[in-house]
Amino acid sequence: MTWGPGAVVALVLAGGAAPELATRADEGAPQPVAPAPEDGGATPAPNPAYEAVVRAPDRLLDPWSVPADATVVVLDAPALAASGARTLQDALARLPGAGLSDEQGNALQQSLSLRGFSAGPVTGSTQGLSVFLDGVRINEPAVEEVNFELIPLEDVERVEVVHGPTAVFGRNTLGGAIHVVTRRGGPGAAGGASAEAGSFEYQRLRAWVQGGAGALDGYLSAQETTERGWRAGGATRSARLFGKLGLRARGTDLSLSYQLQGDRAQEPGSLPPAMLAADPRQNYTRGDFFQPTLHLVTFNGRQELTPGLALAVNGFLRLLHAGQFNANWLGPDTRLLDETTSVGGAVQLTHALRAGVLRGHGSLGLEVTRSAVHVPVHREPNARFLVDEGGAALPRLASDVSDAQLAAGAFGQAQVAIASGPLRGLGATAALRADTLSHDIVDRSPDDPGKASGRATYTRLVPSVGLHWVFGPALTAWASYSEGFRAPAFLELTCADPAAPCVGLQSGVAPDTSFRRLAPVRARTLEVTARVAPAPWCSATVGAYRTDLRDDIYSVTAPGATSVFFQNVGDTRRQGVELGAHAERGAVEVDLTYGYQRATFEDELALASPRTPGGTEQVRRGARIPLVPDHRLSLDVRVRPAEWLVLAAGSSWTSTQYLRGDEANAERPLPSYVLVHAGAELRLGRWTATLRGTNLLDARHETSGSFAPDGRAPGQPVVRFLTPGPPLRLVAGLGLEL
């Protein structure tokens, strides 16, 4: 993976974007910090009028500025383009504390983890990250999962990653929040087209145009991607149309965007040891796929009311129709439909002020979202099962549940900093948010209608406070305390009965009919961070954090099958250290990131397990939470030997991690692995040619694993099922800017 100059801030560290702006005492508008000398000389003498501006992110981001708080990492469009990433999670994988896991066997559907919390399409993983696209929360209301492939990465202006719970972003922000801001048109007409081709019959075609006329601007792009995939039954295809109209005039900023996307991603999944050793390209149950169609309309507006006072509004309509087909070896196949309609909006008032030596920023806001989710599941015949259990004819409707959700939140945030005097650079931030989420679940399943019908409401008040001190351009330190909250999701509530677990999660209805067995998750986080810049050409950030969770919700696999249910597992903890360093001298840039994270159970537990003879495993306090490696290390080097040529290379190392289903840490973990990547970019006039290679050593590796019965083997023994990582991959591209 290669990185552009815009990745300087991003790779500085979790938590550690440096103060980006300075203001002078006699000027009201922010001014850029003076650039460092190109010869790499000593740090310039401090400017006595220097003021550090440290901004925590607001719920609705200001389109004209980038916050520079301790917890914010920013990737801009040049860095995203230079990375060659196909998905957002690919682009973020080099951040300290971040990593990827692949349970579906499809590169588009990898899960992203951050500080031991994940966001991805797999129902049952420890979802704990909030993801927003132009102010719209895109965690699916079914079970808070995130379909990253529905984010238009090539049309993104910047990505802001907020580490740790942050009050203004609301529920599910346990490990952090990711806010994606899309592009819009600019002055003058421009456009371009690009084509890529590579290993496994990968092809991508894209075209875009933008322009402006007076106060109006527009942007439009279209893209189509196809790939056979490196494994049998692993093909993907995707078509996307994205457009945005905007208006900027005298303190007014309005935009209206529309995204239409249709995908089909086949899912080779995991393999038992014998098949994995013989040929990792195989498919255990060929036929699995995920097929979403998305319509998303988003309006964003910002009006400057008076100098320093602004009103921001957001409104959206999101329609998702998704089909999920699962081919099974131990039972009938299942076909799930997810029909989700979400509509909502947010309003936010922000105020910046100057009072003597004090600089302040405050925000107040309110947001409401209404979601209607309908999930029918059909069981269908296959070569081994022509009828359902009990002899019922197939195909048949197995379950039919729907949920009417209402989510609302009110929040406020205040910041103040001392701009001059002996305490110059000292500042504080405080935020408070009240969240409520209600479920109105209706069960129309044919076998036992009404079994899962019921209502549940969860409410929580979430605070956060922080201190920072900008000692000067060379040293900044932060400390914060924050809380987080996650309410049980729709499909968790309908699959919370250990006496009747759900087969494949949604192919059965097994609710806690009282809707009181699952308690909401509560998180408390302490963290400290320091950033040093001993010379203009280098900087480093180091931070430590600890997140304690009460009533963590965890998916448990029932013994003897692929059945699962959700339960609270008491206290868990995520703690770690994150380090980022950046150096740039002459034509060479170097980025180094390291994350140590220790995710543990903090209570003695007896959990259902498919791998133990009695069906239960004893989990001791301090046992590692599966699929969270202790260490991740990455190094990236970028060289520009000429203005028209950029060369890049890098490597990443991920340590061992336990398999899902081995919460007792009794089995052999997944081995550690090293991946090497490289790339080159050649620019000649308006033409750009690229060549990228990943896993250049063609290393065999697995990023995800669990335990399940092997229906192909005599006696159906419970074995390890591992998802193999992709081999060596090369992609070449050619682009033209008009």
Image (cartoon, grey):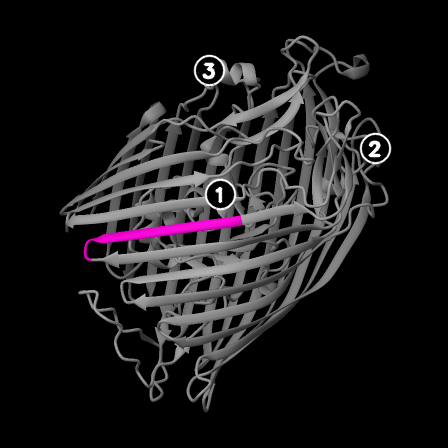
Q: Residue at x 65, y 38 (%)?
A: 124
What is the chief secondary structure element of the magenta stretch? strand
Mark 2 vs mark 3, CA separation in Å? 45 Å
Provide the residue designation for mark 2.
449
Provide the residue designation for mark 3.
279
Residue kind at label 1, given as amino acid type = Gly
Mark 2 vs mark 1, CA separation in Å? 42 Å
- Does residue 14 sit above or below 221 in this rendering? below
Q: Secondary structure at mark 1?
A: strand
Would residue 188 be counted in the magenta stretch?
Answer: no
First to last magenta residue range: 586-596
- Residue 221 spot, x, y in % from top left: 35, 45
Nearest the eye: 541 or 87: 541
Q: Is residue 159 visible?
A: no
Tell me which label, 2 or 3, sits earlier in the chain: 3
Residue kind at label 3, given as amino acid type = Asp
Q: Quadrant of the N terminus?
A: top left
Q: Secondary structure at mark 2?
A: loop
Provide the residue designation for mark 1.
99
The residue mark sitting in front, 2 or 1, is 1
- Residue 571 spot, x, y in % from top left: 73, 50
Nearest the eye: 158 or 115: 115
